[in-house]
Amino acid sequence: MTTPRGHLRRVGMTFGIPVVAAAVILVFYLTWLPRLPERLATHFGMGGRADGFTSVGAFPFVMPTVTLGFGVLFGLLALAMRRNPFAQRLMSAAAGGVALMMLAINVLLLHEHLDVADSTAVTLPGWHIGTVGIGMAVGGALGWFAAGSTPAVEAEPPPDVHTPVREPAVGETVSWRRSQTSPVIGWIMVGMLPVVVLTCAVSTWWLLALHIPVYLLLASFARVVVEIDDSGLTLRMLAGLPRIHVPVPELRTAYSRDIAPLRDFSGWGWRSNSTACGLVLRSGSGLWVHRKQREPLAVTVPDAEEAAALLNGLRDRRAAGGR
């Protein structure tokens, strides 16, 4: 269970970043108010042409409120995840990403209206999408790091598991590699394609800015490559990031046990529960690695029993004074 101080820090960041973003939106609005027209274009159709409008007086009650709403939503989720500090940290990252995305959208929107007499002439250039994407990435990173590290959890392996060992021979170089693809995430990505295409065709541009990061995030977790060499265990995602490395000195033990995504981790992708984290791509063979001063790591991969035996062998060789 997370400490009260860590819990409050993560929840505070989850609420706090959207609050600050909403306040900054209001500061820009009040600063630029004398230069804004009586109504603002707030919805844009094909080609970035304005087709929906909001009065300048209503703007501060709509856009900052939406930003705060996201903060409340993610904050309540973080409160409900008191027993899962890693998930709380993810909520803080999500809140930061959405908050800075909304901040970028609103500041760019207000800037395009400066000294414009007729808001129907306002258009949004395509480069705004990239700017909003950068804002979302920066906000996500800010939320992640501001929430602080998750506490160390050294859960013990279940008493009934077998921990195989295959110690490499003297001078033997270990090189083991397997990959795993998620059919569930693949089907989700296929199902999202029509939504993304439709958004590009008929909707406002900033909704596209929401879809693209989500699609790229799903794609990054659709496949994992599991590698074991003399240095330890390495997990590489589809795009190469994130990369997870467990060096041999950090290994406590490894074993193979089947993983049921819904039962064990409540879903697919990068997951965390109260005792472990891992990359869960499908049901079946799973490699479980217990680390020193960290929570256990699990990954679905073929030949998990062989991988566990190699990792335990590398650990024993290192303990015996081998390289």
Image: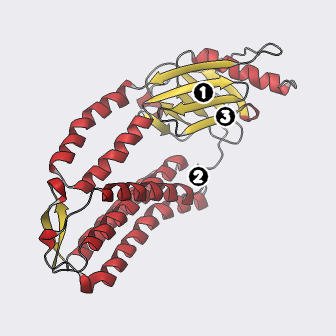
Residue to which mark 3 is pinned: 246
Q: Decide if residue 140 is on the left or right side of residue 317.
A: left
The one of 94 and 163 positioned closer to us in this rendering: 94
The one of 96 and 288 positioned closer to us in this rendering: 96
Residue 146's label in the rendered image is none
Residue 288's label in the rendered image is 1
SS of the residue under disc 1 = strand
Q: Position of residue 20 (x, y in %)?
A: 43, 71
Q: Amino acid at mark 3?
A: Val
Question: Up-down: is 175 above or below 105?
Answer: above
Q: Quadrant of the C terminus?
A: top right
- Viewer can see residue 99: yes
- Viewer can see residue 95: no
CA gap between label 3 and label 2 equals 23 Å
CA gap between label 2 and label 1 equals 22 Å
Residue at x 55% of width, y 62% of height = 9
Residue lying farthest to the right in this orientation: 321
SS of the residue under disc 3 = strand
Of marks 3 and 1, the one in the foreground: 3
SS of the residue under disc 2 = loop
Question: Up-down: is 315 above or below 135?
Answer: above
> In the rendered structure, which disc, 3 or 2, sits on the residue that comes first in sequence?
2
> In the rendered structure, which disc, 2 or 1, sits on the residue that comes first in sequence?
2
> In the rendered structure, which disc, 3 or 1, sits on the residue that comes first in sequence?
3
Q: Amino acid at mark 2?
A: Thr
Residue lying farthest to the bottom in this orientation: 34
Residue to which mark 2 is pinned: 2
Instruction: Count neighbours of disc 1 (C-alpha within 10 A) and say few if under 14, some if 14 to 19, many if 20 or more.
Output: many
